[in-house]
Image: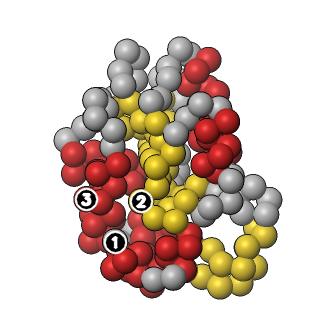
Amino acid sequence: MATLAARIKQSSRLSGSFTLRSGKVSNTYFDKYQFEADPALLKAIAVELAGLIPPGTEVLAGLEMGGIPIVTMLSQETGLPAAFIRKEPKEYGTCRYAEGASLSGKNFILVEDVISSGGAIVDALEKLRRDGLAPTAAICVIDRETGGKETLASVGLSLDSLLTFSAIENS
């Protein structure tokens, strides 16, 4: 796992002043699109992330936008179908916020790339629960260790991460 952390760090770590989704300012930023755009690195991530999928999971649901490449490669790796959770439904076509594989009556998990405050997952979770859909867990590639895991626990959702911010920093 240390090698994978080092590869992600080399590919994606930027230095400077960056405002995160939570509004907090960080002097380091993981340009997740760098590791998500590298097919060999994304494949290696999916191979390891597959081990975090709880037994009995039937569908993998990736959050727009960063969770989409992760869930697509993870679906390819595991053979489990993928769903894609939009931030907002489109106003045309199916008008749904959950696209791809059906989540109704299925055991599914949420898949995200990087977790900071957990806000994106909480937003998705509220929409899903309004429709009677309940993910069994969430997994992510990087937990920035800034309260996201605790936020998700407070709304009844467990989070497992492949790597933490500190593991990548120390790689």
The residue at which mark 3 appears reads as: 47
Q: Which of 129 and 160 is in front in this view?
A: 160
Q: Do the residues labelled 2 and 1 touch (CB within 8 Å)?
A: yes
The residue at which mark 1 appears reads as: 1
- Residue 37 point in image, percent of width and height: 39, 68
Label 2: how many Cα within 10 Å (few below 14, some 14–19, many 20+): many
Q: Secondary structure under badge 3?
A: helix
Up the image or down, 101 lies above or below 159; here it is: above
Q: Are marks 2 and 3 in contact (CB under 8 Å)?
A: no
Q: Which of 123 and 145 is in front in this view?
A: 145
- Residue 83 point in image, percent of width and height: 39, 35
| Residue pictured at 63% horizontal, 74% vertical | 29
Q: Secondary structure under badge 2?
A: strand
Q: Which of marks 2 and 3 is nearer the N terminus?
A: 3
| Residue pictured at 33% horizontal, 79% vertical | 3
Task: Give me the disc on residue 77.
Answer: none
- Indicate which label's residue lies in the foreground, 1 or 3: 1
- Indicate which label's residue lies in the foreground, 2 or 3: 2
Q: What residue type is labelled 2?
A: Leu
Where's the N terminus, which quadrant?
A: bottom left
The residue at which mark 2 appears reads as: 162
Inter-mark Cα distance, 2 to 3: 11 Å
| Residue pictured at 37% horizontal, 15% vertical | 105
